[in-house]
Image (cartoon, rainbow, N blue to C red):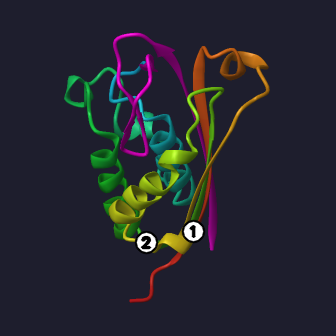
């Protein structure tokens, strides 16, 4: 068994779509970044890569590489899953927390989980997505950005 933790953060800004776990969420601001800036999927990928000792998403998908400009993070997650499987691991479970003062994310939680299950080849009882505010404290609480933490458990695949 191997445990991984991932963390990511992105600023909010006008003129961008807000995409979390591949779900486009209606909001006046979106996350700023080289790819689609899906902070939740980025934290998930870092958790998986960390658990498998494969580095991080900056190593795999550098933000100075034009190939990843505007990239769909779920497509990148599928590539991470290939690397995880090649390394001989499978996911036991994922627990993802999104830190955002607004918008309210609970209406999108199940769609987020479904996307992650589809891309990772998991069942719904293996994936948890939750969101919390920071009681108006810090940059997330002030609505300047969003952050996400993810913890995952990997096990060696049965061959």
Q: Residue at x 36, y 44 (%)?
A: 22
Prevalent SS, magenta region: strand
Rendered-image quadrant of the N terminus? bottom right
Magenta segment boundaries in residue numbering:
1-30
| Among the 4 quarters of the image, the one containing residue 3 | bottom right
Q: Which mark is residue 103?
A: none
Q: Is residue 121 left or right of residue 143?
A: left
Q: Nearer the viewer, residue 158 or 133?
A: 133
Label 2 Cα neighbours within 10 Å, binned few <14 / some 14-19 / many ≥20: some
Let me know if residue 87 is in the magenta part.
no
Q: Could you tell me residue 99's position as x and y percent?
A: 65, 34
Q: Which residue is mark 2?
A: 122
Q: Nearer the viewer, residue 6 or 14?
A: 14
Q: Is residue 4 above or below residue 68?
A: below
Kind of element beneath mark 1: strand
Q: Which residue is mark 1?
A: 93
Earlier in the chain: of badge 1 and badge 2, it is: 1
Count of labels in the image: 2
């Amino acid at each position: 068994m191997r445990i991984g933790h991932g963390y990511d953060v992105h600023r909010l800004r006008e003129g961008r779509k807000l995409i979390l776990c591949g779900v486009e969420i209606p909001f006046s601001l979106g996350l700023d970044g080289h790819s689609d800036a899906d902070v939740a999927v980025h934290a998930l990928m870092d958790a998986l890569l960390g658990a498998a000792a494969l580095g991080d998403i900056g190593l795999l998908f550098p933000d100075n590489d034009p190939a990843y400009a505007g990239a769909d993070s779920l497509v990148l997650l599928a590539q991470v899953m290939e690397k995880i499987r090649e390394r001989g691991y499978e996911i036991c479970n994922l627990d993802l927390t999104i830190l955002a003062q607004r918008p309210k994310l609970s209406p999108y939680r199940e769609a987020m989980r479904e996307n992650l299950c589809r891309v990772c080849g998991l069942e719904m009882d293996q994936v948890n997505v939750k969101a919390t505010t920071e009681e108006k404290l810090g940059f997330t609480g002030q609505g300047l950005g969003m952050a996400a933490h993810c913890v995952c458990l990997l096990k060696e695949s049965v061959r």
